[in-house]
């Protein structure tokens, strides 16, 4: 059953990458059912993350928050710090899309503190672009551009590919910052962020 759950989960992730939410949902739910049957608590936390992210990209932020909050509880119950940090970053994305910028910033920074110490690069990129969105929402466009540049450079370095839906969401959260700067000013700030060493990018992002 473990191998079956992994295979079904991988198929669901492919569908999500392609923006096929209708196809991804039953596969993620099947994966969750298999992991519950196995009693695999870490796998259950992973499935809650997948279903929460799917709900968020579908625009159902209330369901996403419920699923990711449950994930956080499971992660803490089994003592999985990486799952806890992933749940915090996921909840940060939900808060960002709700316009709750202070809460989003706190969640992303808490998650980034853990990921940064362990150099978990894909999740560092999630937090960097999330905090760029927070800066955009709070009227700090140059900071938003620098963090967006740092996130893009990191993603390029590790060949991390975003789902189609997430790319559109990130663009929407950055739109106020892009509108507040000239194209040249945005490009300059973005390039400055992209040139930062990873530890300097993390330090910038962790500033309150």
Image (cartoon, rainbow, N blue to C red):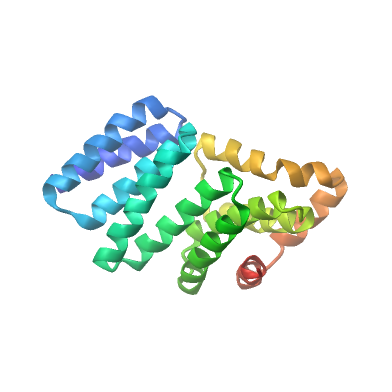
Q: Is residue 28 left or right of residue 137?
A: left
Q: Residue 79: image x %, image y %?
A: 28, 69
- Residue 144, image quadrant: bottom right
Q: Is residue 33 left or right of residue 79?
A: left
Q: Is residue 132 left or right of residue 118?
A: right
Q: Residue 185: image x %, image y %?
A: 85, 51
Say which of 10 and 134 sits in front. Answer: 134
> Which residue is drawn at the image coordinates 61% and 58% (left, top)?
102
Say which of 24 and 90 sits in front. Answer: 90
Q: How many numbered tags mark residues here?
A: 0
Vertical placement of 181 versus 200: above or below? above
Say whether residue 129 is visible: no
Q: Residue at the top extreme? A: 22
Q: Residue 133: image x %, image y %?
A: 65, 50
> Which residue is drawn at the image coordinates 46% and 31% (left, top)?
18
Which quadrant is home to the N terminus? top left
Say whether residue 133 is visible: yes
Say which of 169 and 4 sits in front. Answer: 169
> Which residue is drawn at the image coordinates 42% and 46% (left, top)?
65
Q: Residue 206: image x %, image y %?
A: 61, 69
Q: Is residue 120 left or right of residue 172?
A: left
Which quadrant is home to the C terminus? bottom right
């Amino acid at each position: 059953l473990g191998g079956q759950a992994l295979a079904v989960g991988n198929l669901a992730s492919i569908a999500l990458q392609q923006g096929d939410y209708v196809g991804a949902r039953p596969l993620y739910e099947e994966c969750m059912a298999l992991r519950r049957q196995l009693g695999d608590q870490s796998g259950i936390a992973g499935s809650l993350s997948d279903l929460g992210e799917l709900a968020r990209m579908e625009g159902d932020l209330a369901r996403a928050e419920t699923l990711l909050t449950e994930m956080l509880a499971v992660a803490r119950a089994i003592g999985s710090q990486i799952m806890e940090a992933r749940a915090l970053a996921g909840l940060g994305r939900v808060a960002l899309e709700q316009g709750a910028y202070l809460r989003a910033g706190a969640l992303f920074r808490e998650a980034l503190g853990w990921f940064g110490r362990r150099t978990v690069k894909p999740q560092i990129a999630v937090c960097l672009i999330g905090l760029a969105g927070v800066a955009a929402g709070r009227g700090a466009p140059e900071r938003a551009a620098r963090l967006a540049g740092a996130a893009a450079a990191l993603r390029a370095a590790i060949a991390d590919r975003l789902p189609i839906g997430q790319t559109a969401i990130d663009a929407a959260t950055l739109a106020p910052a892009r509108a507040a700067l000239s194209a040249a000013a945005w490009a300059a700030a973005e390039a400055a962020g992209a040139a930062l060493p990873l530890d300097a990018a993390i330090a910038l992002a962790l500033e309150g």
